[in-house]
Image (cartoon, rainbow, N blue to C red):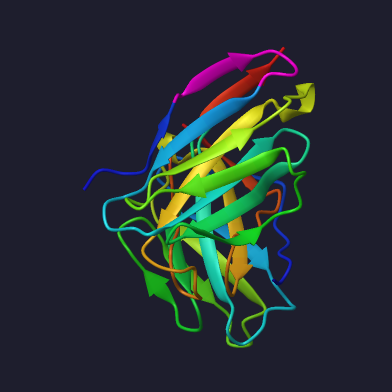
Amino acid sequence: KAGVTQTPRYLIKTRGQQVTLSCSPISGHRSVSWYQQTPGQGLQFLFEYFSETQRNKGNFPGRFSGRQFSNSRSEMNVSTLELGDSALYLCASSLGVLAAGDTQYFGPGTRLTVL
Amino acid sequence: DAKTTQPTSMDCAEGRAANLPCNHSTISGNEYVYWYRQIHSQGPQYIIHGLKNNETNEMASLIITEDRKSSTLILPHATLRDTAVYYCIVRVTDKLIFGTGTRLQVFP
């Protein structure tokens, strides 16, 4: 079974631009979560989607948004990019709604650099 | 979600067992203990998880103390490819909260 895939793997943008990242979960998985990883803040939760609905959101500004499609694929969008948005963006999928005992599997990440 | 405390770094000789400790003294009765590892700039890799009982899979063993306030991840025969940052996480729902983890260096 194929793992979580993320595209693109690397991206370079300039300040003020917007960016869209894509995530395809493991086949059969319906929950997709997004995380941001930076050297200073470590791994931080962005949001989780299940059945096309955002179920949970981390402490990030409204410039960060996401959506999920009927096939469980997910996209996240960052508008008005800032230098501090440079990070590794990770997508993780799990079988169902994240409940105790459910396991998230991570993709390889998208490395975003903002110049 | 409960907070976890892990040593910043550890060394282990290749072929020896690597024992990575984690303290989670405020864990609740329904919170699971999860372990992930991250090899440089890759996505975190799931290793193992448990609630009360000790667990073993093809990668590692997880030993949880009876009071559930601490746990140990055991890599029985460490290899150079096990060099990574290991994260111990406790959660009940919704999301994983990663701490700073333990940087394990396996040396020849």
Please tell me how many numbered marks the rendered image carries. Answer: 0
Identify the main secondary structure in magenta: loop
Residue A81 is left or right of residue A99, and the answer is right
Locate residue B95: give its quadrant: bottom right
Q: Which residues are magenta?
A: A8-17
Residue B6 is left or right of residue A68, and the answer is right
On screen, residue B53 above or below B101: below
Locate residue B92: give its quadrant: bottom right
Would residue A13 be counted in the magenta stretch?
yes
Q: Nearer the viewer, residue A62 or A36?
A: A62
Image quadrant containing the C terminus of chain A: top right
On screen, residue B84 above or below A102: above
- What residue appears at the point 60 percent right and 32 percent down from the top-left corner? A88
Where does residue B39 sit, x and y in percent of width and height?
50, 36
- What residue appears at the point 61 percent right and 53 percent down from the top-left corner? A47
On screen, residue A100 above or below A45: below
Residue A2 can be seen, yes or no:
yes
Where does residue A24 sit, x and y in percent of width and height?
37, 42
Would residue A69 be counted in the magenta stretch?
no
Q: Nearer the viewer, residue A84 or B60?
A: A84
- What residue appears at the point 76 percent right and 41 percent down from the top-left corner? A41
- What residue appears at the point 61 percent right and 87 percent down from the top-left corner? B29
Where does residue B108 sit, x and y in percent of width and height?
46, 31
Where does residue A2 sit, x and y in percent of width and height?
25, 43
Residue B13 can be seen, yes or no:
no
Locate residue B103: give its quadrant: top right
